[in-house]
Image (cartoon, grey):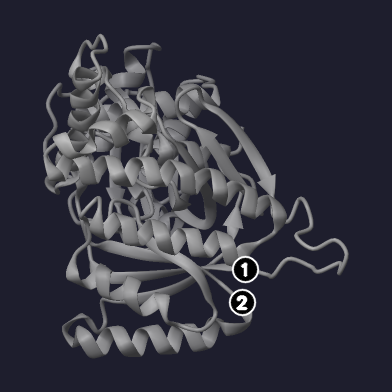
Amino acid sequence: MDCKDKFRSLYHREPESVAFCPYRICPIGAHSDHNLGKITGLAIDKGIRIAYSPKLNGVVELCSLQFDKRAQWHVLQVSQKKENDWADYLRGATLLLSSRFPLKRGISGVIEGSLPIGGLSSSAAVVLAFLEAICDVNCISLTPLEMIQISVQVENEYVGVSCGKLDQSCEVFSKKDRLLYLDTRDDSYELIPFGQTNPDPEMCRKPLPFDIAIFFSGLERNLSGSRFNQRVDEARSAAYALMAYDGRDYGKFKETNLRDIPVETFMKYRDRMPENWAKRADHWYSEFDRVQKGAEAWRKGDILEYGRLSFESGHSSIYNWETGSPELKALYEIMTHTDGIYGGRFSGAGFKGCCMALIDPRYAESIERSVTREYLRLFPELRGKYSFHLCHSADGLDF
């Protein structure tokens, strides 16, 4: 049963519309945006759909095909505190939107996610799809940047996750078969066609084809209850310490970013910092360099080099950012020695969830067999929960 079928069964009529927001992957650029780094990413052809119709009395009434509990609130009477359930993201979106625009209408809606939860920014996707729906029934037109800003505020201020704008930007700005290359400091971005410049013009070599594989570990995760915020604080602590060591003026802790500090300053004072702070900074600076190299590799159509850098990003996430459950680490290691996989890493924060990979489409079936066999040999208890999904790049939100 999809969201439209469920809507019909609940309300005995057709929904007036369906909002959609794609999921995203970030092959290079992870754990960077919260300190104003650069990222590369792609939207994929799976995501969140909300079948909905307006409610003239201002009530928001939602159910999800992924969760049992239904949720309800009035657009003008949203709790200032979260209730610690799946609908908190949408309560927060309602509250923040109502602080900018007058809301009069609510919605009846059914939410459907086309992939398991964890690692593909489903929280950002459901907020963006909900904003699309609630704005539609209230005749509100948001710019792409406003959609991103409100969605990030929901995570930071209402739910309590110290994320940056990576997820939302990928889901809004992306275009099919183009790599989003975004600077989160000023929101400038480029959409790079794959193989914009030929890597070997004398031989007229065509860029290798690619598809996107998603390997779900079988374990779901919740960032607000993970070590995600701790890692972000450790990276910012490194930035704060470097400012002090270098005799720079510094202000509020949350306004201090590694982007404001040259890598040469970090290398000068690295050994004076606590080791965990230094490791977080090691990841951030090396990831910044990988993103820039990755964008150029993509521009040339060099998927082998881009994939190598993505694998390198995954390695740094394990050993410098120090994230990853045993299951995800195992998936990552399996991917590194599987024929036909160009590169990949944890998708999202790396606390449970899934891994993503850029693969040669000609190897898709053998990749699915090989990775599934090896992973379930290590974790047989996850049979029936682990899953493989073949995806393609896609457009972001339609404005």
| Mark 2 secondary-structure assignment | helix
Q: How many marks?
A: 2
In the displayed image of the protein, which residue is found farthest to the front? 268
Please name the amino acid that badge 1 sits on: Phe
User: Looking at the image, do the residues carrying marks 1 and 2 touch, with CB atoms under 8 Å apart?
Assistant: yes
Answer with the quarter of the image where residue 383 lies. Answer: bottom left
Horizontal and vertical percent position of residue 71: 21, 41
Please name the amino acid that badge 2 sits on: Pro
Q: Is residue 99 left or right of residue 26?
A: left
Q: Nearer the viewer, residue 35 or 23?
A: 35
The label on residue 210 is: 1
Q: Is residue 276 left or right of residue 50?
A: left
Could you tell me which residue is drawn at 79 percent across and 63 percent down? 200
Rendered view: 348 above or below 385: above
Quickly name the residue at label 2. 361
From the image, which quarter does the N terminus lie in? bottom left
Q: Nearer the viewer, residue 130 or 43?
A: 43
Horizontal and vertical percent position of residue 30: 38, 47
Label 1 CA crowd tier, 10 Å (few <14, some 14–19, many 20+) = many
Q: Nearer the viewer, residue 87 or 181?
A: 181
Residue 21 at least partly seen: no
The label on residue 67 is: none
